[in-house]
Image (cartoon, grey):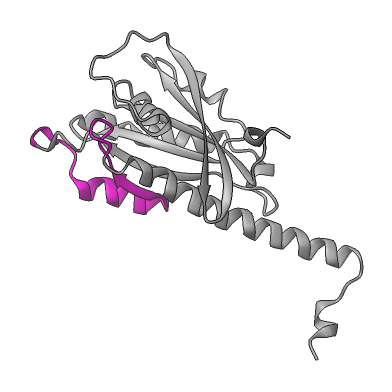
Amino acid sequence: MDQYNTFDKKFKLFTIGDNKVGKSSIIKRYAEGIFNEETEKQIPGVDFKMKTINFQNKKIKLEIWYLVGRETNIIYSSLYYKATSGFILVYDITDKQSFNNIDNWYMETTRTITPIEMSQFYLPPVFILVGNKSDLEDKREVLFKEGSDYADSKGMKFIETSAKIGDNIEDIFTKLCSELLVKADKIVDKSEDINKSSRGFCTSCYSM
C-alpha cells in the first residue's frame, strides 16, 4: 500500500476570516514553509493543502481548506464546510473590523452543523481563534486580551501568530490536533460501550 495513503486519523480543517487577514499565508507557511511578501492576484473561491504529520504517536493526515480572494458572501463559503473537523478563525490584529467580523464567521459555521454532527456519536468541530500579523505590533488595533476574551466566551483556543516570520504557526495545528484526538477517543469509547450493551454485555456484572 502507498505509504502516503496510510494514516491513523484524517482531519479536514477550514480556515476562514475576512479578506487580507493572512489565511493563505498561514496555510502556505505551515504546509510548504514559504511566505510571499507580495500579494498574489487570486480568484475568489477556495483552495486546500495537504500535510501528513506525526503527532502523539499517530500519523495524521490534514486536509486544510482556506478561502482565497475577496469574500463577498459568507454563505458561499459555507457550501464547503461539510465534514469539517476544525475551524481556524483568523483576524488581523492591525484591522479592528476584521476582528469585529469574527462573530459573523463563527455564527455561520455553527449554523451549518447538522443534528447528526451534534450527536454524541459524531465528532463535532473544534475551533481556534487566530490573531495574525503579530509582527506588526506598532500597528496593533486589537488587544491580545480582546482576542483571548472572545475565544474564552466561545470555549475555543486562542493564539496570536505571524505568518511572515513563522511565529506560532505550528502551534495552531498542534492545539487543534490535540483537541481533536481527545474528542475522537471519547467517541470511540462511547461507541464501544454501546456495542457491548447491544450484545447484552453487562460491565457491572464483572466488577466483583
Query: How many labels, in total?
Result: 0
**Image position, residue 62 (x, y; %):** 54, 37
**Image position, residue 163 (x, y; %):** 28, 32
Which of 66 and 32 lies nearest the eye of the viewer? 32
What are the residue bounds of the magenta stretch?
Answer: 138-166
Name the residue furthest right.
Answer: 200
- Check residue 148 for magenta coloring: yes
**Image position, residue 164 (x, y; %):** 24, 30
Q: What residue is drawn where x is 35% and y is 54%?
A: 152
In this picture, residue 168 sits left or right of residue 63: left
Name the residue furthest bottom.
Answer: 208
Q: What residue is drawn where x is 80% and y is 62%?
A: 194
Q: What residue is drawn where x is 74% and y is 35%?
A: 1
In this picture, residue 46 sits left or right of residue 171: right
In this picture, residue 47 sits left or right of residue 195: left
Which of 23 and 58 lies nearest the eye of the viewer? 58
65 up-or-down from 129: above or below? above
- Tell me the quarter of the image containing the C terminus: bottom right
166 up-or-down from 58: above or below? above
Q: Which picture quadrant has residue 203?
A: bottom right
Which of 78 and 136 lies nearest the eye of the viewer? 136
- Check residue 184 for magenta coloring: no
Q: Which picture quadrant has residue 139?
A: top left
205 up-or-down from 54: above or below? below
**Image position, residue 146 (x, y; %):** 23, 46
